[in-house]
Amino acid sequence: MDSKASLFGNGSRPARIALFSGNYNYTLDGANKSLNRLVDHVQRTTGAQVRIYSPTSPTPAFAPVGDLVSVPSVTIPFRKDYRLALGIPPAIRRDVEAFAPDLIHLSAPDLLGSAALKLGRSLKTPVVASLHTLFDSYLDYYGLGGLRALARRLRSGPNLGARRGRRAVQSGAPQRGLARGAGL
C-alpha cells in the first residue's frame, strides 16, 4: 500500500493519525482506557496529531485524550449504555479528508471500522487494526447465541481478524489469548 509520508519522519509536519473507535469515552471499559493511554503516549512521545472518530454521548464517562469527533450513532437495544455507528456519513468523510491522516487506526470491529477501512483504501492511506474485545463471546450472555456465527464472520470481515488482517497493513491485539481468538 502506498504511504503518503513516512509516519514519524517526514519533517514537514507532525504525523496525523485518524483513530476509529466504537467506544472512545462514552462509557468506561478497559479497551477505551487503553486506547486513550495509547493516544496520550503517541502524542507525547512523537508529537503526532491524533483525531478520534467515535460515537459519543452527552454524558461521557471521562474526558477524552486527543481530538474527538462525534460520529452519528444509535443505542444498542440490549445495552442502552453502548452506541453503534452505522458507517461514515459524508460530513465525517470530508473531515477525515481535510485532516489528511498519514495513518488510519481501526479499533471498531463494526460498520464504522468497515467504512473506515474502505475510506483508507480510497485515500491510499496505510491502515492498522487492533482488537480489544471478542464481542461475539457476549452473545450467549444476552441470549443471542444464535448470532455468534454471524458475529464471527463480521469480526473476520474487512478490518480485523483473519480476513481483516490481510486487508489492513498490520493487525494486532494486546493479549495473546485475544489474538488467538481473533485468528491473528
Image (cartoon, rainbow, N blue to C red):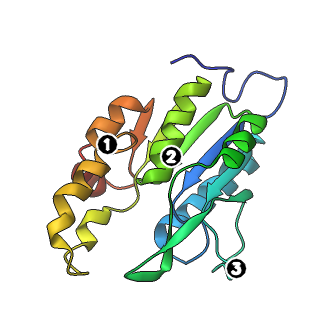
**Mark 1 vs 2, N-terminal side:** 2
Q: Position of residue 158 (x, y in %)?
A: 37, 39
Identity of the residue drawn at 36% across and 44% down? 160
Judging depth in this view, the residue of 139 and 11 nearest the camera is 139
Label placed on residue 157: 1
Which quadrant: the C terminus? Answer: top left
Residue type indicated by callout 2? Leu
Disc 3 secondary structure class: loop
Left or right: where 82 falls relative to 144: right
Judging depth in this view, the residue of 90 and 114 nearest the camera is 90
Residue 84 sits above or below residue 3 on the image: below
Does residue 138 appear in the picture of this structure?
Answer: yes
**Callout 3 crowding tier (Cα within 10 Å): few <14, some 14–19, many ≥20:** few
**Callout 1 crowding tier (Cα within 10 Å): few <14, some 14–19, many ≥20:** some
Q: Position of residue 121 (x, y in %)?
A: 52, 27
What separation in Å lies between label 1 and label 2 (alpha carbons)?
Answer: 13 Å
Disc 1 secondary structure class: loop
Label placed on residue 58: 3
Look at mark 2 in the image and give the residue it sits on: 106
Residue 147 sits above or below residue 153 on the image: below
Label placed on residue 105: none
